[in-house]
């Protein structure tokens, strides 16, 4: 037999070899964990930036009954708006002046549904005029990134962070969800995640009714919000429990949860009445629906048109084996169905708006190919295409979004006392919404970025973490969670 000539390694030697290999692996993982813990965000832009100046000769978008105030000066001191006044009035002499030359200024955009899977995503978003992101699937590294941003170590949209996603053991993904079927364990997890520093709790439709209710109740006792998908189980038993959601994510969840994937005007009215009467805003996320539709119909032709360099390499590797593979491999029949559903979701969003449901903007950027910033603007333009008035779309990304965050006293308006998060455009977004794609200036917390600096920040949005660091970062989260 040919195997008779094989020289077998003694059992003792095998044991020592395995021990040696395991030791090397353990040391390697430990070294990577230490590196990931201490690796830090950076930027080539000048870190020190004055937070006090005057932006004069601008037209201010209030998005109220008088939507535009012409020929204004916005006086910013220490990162806050001190006042908004006529540019013809005397201005403080102790502040530098930036001439807006008749441009249009509005509050910085807020995207309420994103997945920030690299520091570069927050950089790209800020470069596009999105000054705040609500991350809808938290990992431990997000807490670190938020701290770095607040300390001014690099520049990106400020982050509002959800906990890891709560889902059932049966339906959850153990690599990206916190899976739980016990109400007691869910309550403890709510407390633990809030103590760790997450801002609110994210829930998914797979949660059992009693677990979902436990999460809502525990969060209420702690004074923190819960946002996400409805529980299909709980919808059958106690729809009213969802009234405490800070926001209802995805118009597709209305289609699935309320309409049962049928075009039913009575069920639309039921959904609209529930959301309106309980003042639960809807986050449509039309952009991600369009994206999966294009992937399933145009396939590689769609991918060839996208800037894939913005995607984190680990995320891209995972998606190529999961969601991208799913939609690129879709049958012609599924592609046609997706087209029909995508069109209907746009109609449904408009119908809910017409029936008085409050809309707030969220793109679900990071779930497929698109990243925060470009996806945010695409979401706004899709809402406009769906028939929603431009002013209402802009309110959904500013005033309404700030209310969802429970920060309507400091975000979402160009007004006295508000945080100086502003975007300046060459044209009026109310009449030319496409101008949202190219801000001329962005001011975040009083720090001003010129067009040239925004281009630099956009380039940094393509410089993401390496595959090794990204994998290690996620493993570090899984080990500690």
Image (cartoon, rainbow, N blue to C red):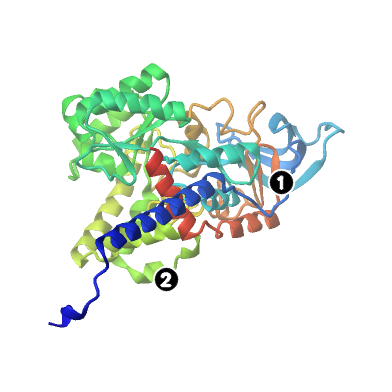
Using the rendered view, name the quadrant where residue 254 is placed.
top left
Q: Position of residue 424 (x, y in %)?
A: 65, 46
Residue toward you, 30 or 75: 30
Please rate how many residues cluster around mark 2, counting C-alpha atoms within 10 Å: few if below 14, some from 14 to 19, many from 20: few
Residue 7 percent location from the top left of the image: 25, 75
- Identify whether 273 is placed above or below 359: above
According to the picture, the residue beneath numbered tag 2 turns out to be 304
Residue at image coords 60%, 57%: 460
- Residue linked to disc 1: 47
| Outermost bottom residue | 2
Vertical relation: 98 (above or below) 94: below
Q: Which mark is residue 84?
A: none
How many neighbours does mark 1 have within 10 angstroms: few (below 14), some (14-19), or many (20 or more)? few
What's the CA distance linking mark 1 and mark 2?
A: 36 Å
SS label for mark 2: helix
Q: Nearer the viewer, mark 1 or mark 2?
A: 1
Question: In the picture, which quadrant includes the N terminus?
Answer: bottom left
In screen coordinates, is 275 left or right of 475?
Answer: left
The number of callouts visible is: 2
Nearest the viewer among 363 and 271 is 363
Q: Is residue 419 left or right of residue 221?
A: right
Q: Residue furthest left?
A: 1
Visible residue check, residue 180: yes
Residue 247 vertical position relative to residue 437 in the rendered view, above or below: above
Dot 1 or dot 2, earlier in sequence? 1
Q: Residue furthest right?
A: 93
169 sits to left or right of 107: left
**Quadrant where the C terminus is found in the figure:** top left
Find numbered disc 1 in the image and state the secondary structure of the residue it sits on. Answer: loop
User: Where is residue 412 drawn, in percent x and y?
Assistant: 56, 34
Q: Residue at x 68, y 55 (%)?
A: 44
Residue at image position (54%, 42%) is: 145
């Amino acid at each position: 037999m040919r195997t008779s000539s094989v020289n077998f390694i003694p059992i003792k030697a095998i044991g020592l070899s395995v021990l040696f290999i395991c030791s090397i692996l353990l040391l390697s993982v430990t070294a990577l964990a230490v590196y990931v813990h201490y690796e830090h965000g950076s930027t080539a832009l000048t870190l020190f930036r004055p937070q006090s100046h005057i932006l004069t000769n601008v037209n201010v978008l209030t998005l109220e009954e008088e939507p535009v105030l012409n020929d204004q000066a916005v006086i910013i001191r220490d990162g806050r708006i001190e006042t908004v006044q006529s540019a013809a009035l005397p201005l403080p002499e102790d502040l530098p002046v930036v001439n807006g030359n008749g441009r249009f200024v509005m509050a910085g955009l807020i995207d309420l549904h994103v997945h920030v899977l690299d520091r570069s995503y927050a950089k790209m978003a800020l470069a596009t005029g999105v000054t705040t992101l609500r991350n809808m699937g938290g990992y431990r590294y997000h807490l670190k990134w938020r701290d770095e941003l607040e300390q001014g170590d690099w520049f990106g949209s400020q982050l509002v962070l959800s906990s890891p996603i709560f889902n059932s053991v049966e339906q959850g993904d153990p690599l990206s969800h916190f899976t739980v079927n016990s109400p007691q364990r869910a309550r403890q997890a709510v407390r633990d995640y809030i103590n760790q520093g997450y801002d609110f709790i994210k829930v998914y439709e797979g949660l059992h009714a009693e677990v979902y209710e436990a999460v809502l109740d525990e969060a209420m006792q702690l004074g923190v919000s819960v946002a996400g998908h409805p529980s299909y189980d709980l919808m059958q038993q106690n729809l009213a429990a969802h009234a405490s959601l800070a926001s209802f994510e995805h118009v597709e969840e209305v289609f699935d949860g309320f309409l049962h994937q049928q075009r039913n005007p009575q069920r639309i009215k039921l959904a609209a009445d529930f959301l309106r009467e309980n003042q639960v805003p809807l986050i449509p996320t039309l952009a991600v629906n369009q994206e999966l539709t294009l992937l399933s119909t145009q396939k590689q032709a769609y991918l060839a048109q996208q800037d894939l360099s913005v995607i984190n390499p680990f995320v891209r590797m995972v998606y190529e084996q999961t969601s991208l593979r799913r939609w690129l491999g879709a049958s012609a029949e599924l592609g046609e169905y997706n087209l029909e559903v995508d069109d209907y979701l746009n109609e449904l969003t408009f119908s809910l708006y017409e029936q008085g449901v409050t809309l707030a903007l969220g793109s679900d950027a990071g779930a497929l190919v698109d990243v925060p910033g470009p996806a945010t603007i695409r979401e706004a333009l899709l809402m406009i295409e769906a028939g929603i008035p431009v002013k209402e779309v802009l309110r959904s990304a500013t005033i309404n979004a700030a209310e969802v965050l429970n920060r309507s006293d400091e975000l979402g308006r160009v007004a006295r006392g508000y945080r100086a998060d502003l975007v300046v455009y060459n044209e009026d977004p109310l009449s030319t919404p496409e101008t949202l794609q190219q801000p001329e200036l962005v001011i975040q917390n009083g720090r001003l970025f010129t067009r040239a600096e925004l281009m630099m920040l956009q380039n940094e949005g393509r410089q993401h973490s390496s595959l090794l660091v990204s994998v290690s970062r996620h493993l570090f989260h899984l080990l500690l969670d």
